[in-house]
């Protein structure tokens, strides 16, 4: 066996503890044998780790498991203590402020929500004060001390400098201005000592994909979320990639059709977002249907027409629906080809409305992607349609942000004593 020179005992101890904690975070309960089957440690070492984690309050005994086929003593079951620490997640925009308090099992313990009533929505100052009020509200509800909160995670649309805590470009709320120092502005209104995090909501939607698929932590994945707008994330070896100015993930603003005449929110033309965003696509379809009546979609109330209706019509052979989806497939193909070249990822995961698309769209896209290659090098990138992040994007962004925050906490937790 190759010796690992230069590894300090404290680093090895931390690594062993982290491996056990991470295993608990992906399983509802575990026995000593379960851990031994995954982590290369002796039974004695694992029992010592479990005893110490129990003393720290991170895990607790939750009863007895099933005995083996040979009978014998039933093994003790251990699980994370959900009340060990908490995360406060806040999604904000000029239209709303939503806050949730989540435990270690990602259960929502309390919520705070406010929607704007004026036409112009909330001002930036109002959002800062609302977010601070939300933190106080959920902490008071549970009578929490600052030390019990792993972090407060703020997330929104727009371009974010995550380390500096600056909302560089609130694209959907240009009236707020640019280069907004969120951390500096909200800290005076918050309890001291709680770490703050800020990012684009789409990055946390991407991070959610690590929850049920921990194997993705050792891969290079790209997520693409499409709804009323488009965003995404790159997660390399379990870490979010942001880039120098926070542009990684702004895939909606990659040009995929230079002939497209609709102007994007970013000010440019031909952006992927202007072609595939749900509202703009449905607006084009309704406009054309009012001038023609050769599609089965004309039988529906056009004002309540959904993209799912278009997917279904295409599956049923409707040529009009297929024509529009063929155009969308071409836009996806251009974008995904470029993402493959830029990132060469193990997997690209499509989230949002297109992850609910039916057979015609998905099969057509998969066929085209399979034909794309650079220098005749076959791509091994997997294209996956998310089974979770396809409806309630707020919920998954909240859970994804909590997962990220707990990850940061456990990575920095002192496990060397």
Image (cartoon, rainbow, N blue to C red):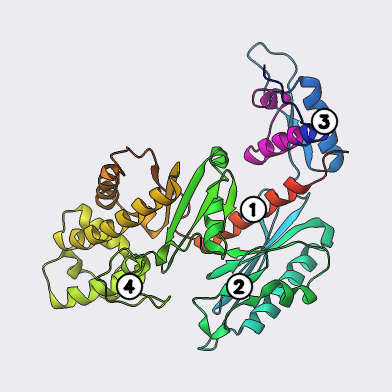
For label 3, the residue is 9
Specify the label residue 280 is tagged with.
4
Q: Are marks 3 and 4 in contact (CB under 8 Å)?
A: no
Q: Of tags 3 and 1, which is closer to the observer? A: 3
Above or below residue 67? Residue 287 is: below
Q: Is residue 20 magenta?
A: yes
Can residue 396 be spotted in the picture?
no
Q: CA distance from mark 1 to mark 4?
A: 32 Å
Q: Are marks 4 and 2 in contact (CB under 8 Å)?
A: no
Q: Which residues are magenta?
A: 15-39
Q: Are marks 3 and 1 in contact (CB under 8 Å)?
A: no
For label 2, the residue is 167
Residue at image coords 83%, 67%: 192
Residue at image coords 54%, 89%: 118
Q: CA distance from mark 3 to mark 2?
A: 41 Å
Determine which quarter of the picture holds residue 100.
bottom right
Looking at the image, is mark 3 or mark 2 earlier in the sequence? 3
Front-most of residues 213 and 381: 381
Q: Could you tell me what secondary structure mostly forms the magenta stretch? A: helix
Looking at the image, is mark 3 or mark 4 earlier in the sequence? 3
User: In what element is the residue under mark 4?
Assistant: helix
For label 1, the residue is 404
User: In what element is the residue under mark 3?
Assistant: helix
């Amino acid at each position: 066996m190759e010796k690992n020179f230069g590894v300090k005992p404290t680093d090895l101890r931390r690594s062993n503890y982290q491996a056990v904690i991470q295993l608990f975070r992906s399983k509802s309960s575990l026995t000593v044998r379960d851990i031994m089957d995954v982590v290369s440690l002796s039974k004695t070492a694992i029992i010592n780790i479990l005893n110490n984690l129990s003393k720290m309050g991170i895990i607790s005994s939750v009863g007895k498991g099933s005995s083996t086929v040979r009978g014998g003593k039933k093994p003790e079951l251990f699980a994370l203590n959900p009340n060990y620490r908490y995360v406060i997640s806040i999604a904000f925009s000029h239209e709303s402020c939503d806050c949730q308090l989540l435990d270690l099992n990602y259960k929502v313990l309390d919520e705070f929500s406010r929607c704007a009533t004026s036409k112009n929505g909330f001002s930036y100052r109002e959002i800062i004060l609302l977010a601070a009020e939300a933190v106080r509200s959920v902490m008071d509800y549970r009578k929490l001390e600052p030390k019990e909160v792993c972090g407060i995670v703020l997330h929104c649309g727009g371009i974010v400098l995550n380390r500096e805590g600056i909302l560089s470009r609130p694209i959907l709320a240009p009236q707020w201005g640019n280069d907004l120092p969120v951390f500096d502005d909200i800290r005076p209104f918050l309890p001291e000592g709680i770490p703050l995090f800020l990012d684009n909501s789409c990055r946390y939607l991407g991070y959610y994909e690590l929850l049920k698929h921990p194997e993705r932590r050792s891969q290079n994945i790209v997520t693409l979320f499409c709804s009323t707008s488009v965003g995404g994330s790159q997660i390399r070896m379990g870490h979010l990639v942001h880039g120098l100015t926070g542009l990684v993930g702004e895939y909606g603003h990659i040009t995929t059709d230079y002939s497209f005449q609709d102007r994007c929110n970013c000010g440019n033309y031909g952006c992927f977002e202007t072609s595939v965003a749900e509202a703009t696509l449905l607006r084009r379809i309704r406009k054309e249907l009012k001038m023609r009546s050769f599609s089965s979609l004309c039988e529906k109330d056009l004002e309540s027409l959904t993209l799912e209706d278009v997917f279904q019509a295409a599956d049923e052979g409707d040529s009009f629906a297929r024509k529009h989806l063929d155009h969308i497939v071409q836009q996806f193909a251009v974008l995904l080809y470029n993402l493959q070249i830029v990132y060469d990822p193990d997997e690209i995961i499509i989230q949002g409305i297109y992850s609910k698309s039916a057979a015609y769209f998905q099969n057509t896209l998969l066929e085209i992607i399979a034909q794309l290659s650079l220098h005749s090098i076959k791509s091994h990138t997997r294209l996956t349609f998310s089974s979770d992040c396809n409806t309630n994007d707020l919920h998954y962004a909240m859970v994804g942000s909590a997962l990220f925050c707990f990850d940061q906490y456990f990575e920095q937790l002192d496990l060397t004593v």
